[in-house]
Amino acid sequence: LLKDKDTERKRYQEMFGVLKITALALASTSFTLQNKQVSPYRKQLSLSASSQESYSSGEQQQPQPSTSKKRLQPFSRYLEIECWKNSHLRDLEPVLISIGQACKQINRIVQRAQTDDLYGNALDKSTGLELDENVQGEVQQKLDVVCNEIMLRSLCGCGSAIAAVASEEEEVPRCCSDVMGNSAFETGDYVAVFDPLDGSKNIDSSLPVGTIFGIYKKPIKGTETSDNLDDSFLQRGSNQNLVVGGYCLYSATTVLVLTLGSGVDGFTLDPDKGVFLHTHRDIRIPKSGAIYSFNEANFMDFSEGVQAYLQGLKTGSSSTGLKAQARYIGSLVGDIHNILINGGVFGYPATQSNPSGKLRLLYESCPMAMIVEQAGGAASTGKGRILDIMPNKIHQRVPTFIGSIENVYEIDQFHKYYDEA
């Protein structure tokens, strides 16, 4: 009898041991179906282990905030849908994906500029001396050269849609066959323009910078164009010539803003996944705004109409009825993004030293004008719509006022009144 009881007790102990091991295994591998969070049992084990490490190293354990990811559409999926809906844009899908990849590369370079010795003026590879001033009369920065090369290869090397490119850093446009060193890249129905790193001098102070780009439909031979490469670029931004406008802002977050001619959307770079996610759907700029973004150090060089407009803002006599707020970053992308989200007006007027303004028409003013107009705003030179200007050279400059429609209309009225007077 005792022998039978002893045998039965051992059998129950073995069964209990198996159940205990099974329960521990299930607890350690349990995940919730919705967010796949680790089970409380394993979380407790993990916390206790990390606590022991912290105490052993003398560090105080800090509570970790609980976060959850939004379910957002990736940039690639957005492009797939939009290009399917708009058949005329299907050839540009790989181009836009490549631009997104280029922006991610530039974002990493901007963040590593200090640690990787990318600050300062660019050097000639052969002589080791500083490069001469570029076509803009500016000394090229190391970052400008690196980012320019990234954009050139991203636009030309992604397929057969882009035939030629024009950059702020290049004196003349370049065929993609020249950029890639292969005649297979010489065909394409579009040309691309860009400023690889707008506001690059802001990098030294860790201030926002950005990339601006635009894609134009290449004119059909025999109508508006000739064999001259410049003629493919010298066209108005209106009449559906400019089919894509966009910029990427490198700041507290990295935001890619894009228009394909039917509204404006924004995509924020997820640093964990390394993907742009659709965070800003159908961006609409307010009809009027309190922010004005001008470099007022040049106030005395502005025209009488611009001076009177700015004085009206400061004294509260603006037709918008809003109390003015000055915000100026010194980076076109940063300033325009602020205006696009909050409303107001950005201005870079003509001055005595720059009677044609400072911003370049093809690859700065036109892409930004297209974005803001598609968001419900306006873009003007003070005397007319920016997108209606017919450029006469690649690096042509124009006075630029971009922002909420009521703010831009008001500054146009000041120009008209003082010009007539």
Image (tube, rainbow, N blue to C red):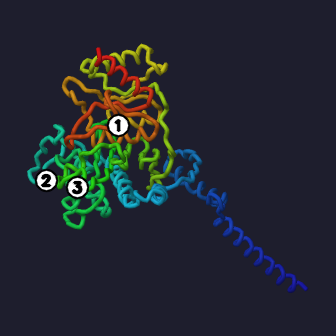
288 w.r.t. 135: above or below = above
317 w.r.t. 19: above or below = above
* Picture residue at 42% right of the left edge, 33% below the top: 339
Q: Nearer the viewer, residue 418 or 186?
A: 418
Badge 1 or badge 2: first in the primary sequence: 2
Q: Nearer the viewer, residue 222 or 52?
A: 222
* Picture residue at 34% right of the left edge, 29% below the top: 347
- Label 1, secondary structure: give it: loop
Residue 156 pos. (x, y %): 27, 59
- Label 3, secondary structure: give it: loop
> Looking at the image, do the residues carrying marks 3 and 2 touch, with CB atoms under 8 Å apart?
no
> What amino acid does circle 2 point to?
Lys
Residue 320 pos. (x, y %): 47, 21
Residue 222: image tag: 3
Badge 3 or badge 2: first in the primary sequence: 2
- Which residue reaches farthest right? 1
CA–CA distance in space, label 3 to label 2: 42 Å
> What amino acid does circle 3 point to?
Gly
Tell me if mark 1 has few (under 14), some (14-19) or many (20+) residues whose alpha carbon lies within 10 angstroms of its own.
Answer: some
Mark 1, residue position: 207
Badge 1 or badge 3: first in the primary sequence: 1
Mark 2, residue position: 125
Residue 70 pos. (x, y %): 57, 51
CA–CA distance in space, label 1 to label 3: 47 Å
